[in-house]
Amino acid sequence: MKNRLRVLRAEQAWSQESLAERLGVSRQTVNAVETGKYDPSLPLAFRMAQLFGKTIEDIFQPDPELQ
Amino acid sequence: MSTIPIARRYSVPVVTSAALWFALYFAARVLLKRYDLETWPRVAIALAPLVPFAWCLVSIVRAVRAMDELERRIHLEALGFAYPLATFLLMTLALMQRAVTLSFEDWSYAHVWFYLPVFYCFGLILSTRRYE
């Protein structure tokens, strides 16, 4: 799964630490999501979408290879 | 939630209790070997390491409860690594036992428990690196 988390975070000028604190997760989790090594749970994806004022589809896109 | 990794947040009680257990375990072994005590003092000394061990387990459970979803996954994967490895070791010892008598002091089932946390730590290292 691809995501625009890094771009959205950069737009807000937030560090990974800062975003992690807002989401209630560790910085390692934010980094793993941004680098595509970890796909977040649905509740966490909703929290991310709510935080950035977007829909989940605005942030996460399915991997083109899997479509 | 703090963004300090869970391993660092909970490392003090886990490491302290584990160190205490380790020290008591070896002290109990030495005492039981050197002194010819009555049965009940022997039992008390033999079971003394259980107190810090229980503290260590409680600390680990508290740490897991405070983890976020990725940290829990990492620990689950570590368990998924350690459990089959420990089963493999048990099976090896069981098969060896069929062929030869394994010494309790040297290699036997009694030593498998010691390898469980070692395998678990290996699993943690591997799984953590996977998500870095």
Image: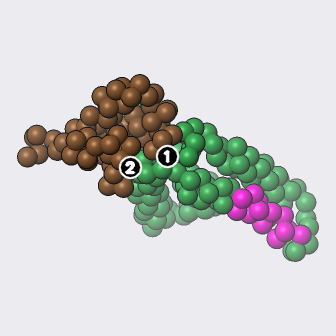
Chain colours: A brown, B green
Residue at the (48%, 50%) spot, across then down: B68
CA–CA distance in space, label 2 to label 1:
9 Å
* Between B24 and B57, the one nearer to me in the picture: B57
Residue at the (44%, 58%) spot, across then down: B83
Whether residue A19 is visible, yes or no, is yes
Residue that mark 2 sits on: A47
In the rendered structure, the answer to whether residue B110 lies left or right of residue A6 reads right
User: Which kind of residue does numbered mark 2 sit on?
Assistant: Arg
In the rendered image, residue B48 lying in the magenta stretch gets the answer yes
In the rendered image, residue A7 lying in the magenta stretch gets the answer no
Q: Give the range drawn in magenta.
A: B41-55
State the mark number for residue B31.
none
Q: Which chain carries label 1?
A: A
- Disc 2 + disc 1, Cβ < 8 Å: yes
State the mark number for residue A24.
1
Q: Main secondary structure of the magenta part?
A: helix
Locate the C terminus of chain B by quadrant.
top left
Q: Is mark 2 on a helix, strand or loop?
A: helix
Q: In which quarter of the image is residue B25?
A: bottom right
**How far across and down, in percent of the image, does residue B71 sit?**
47, 47
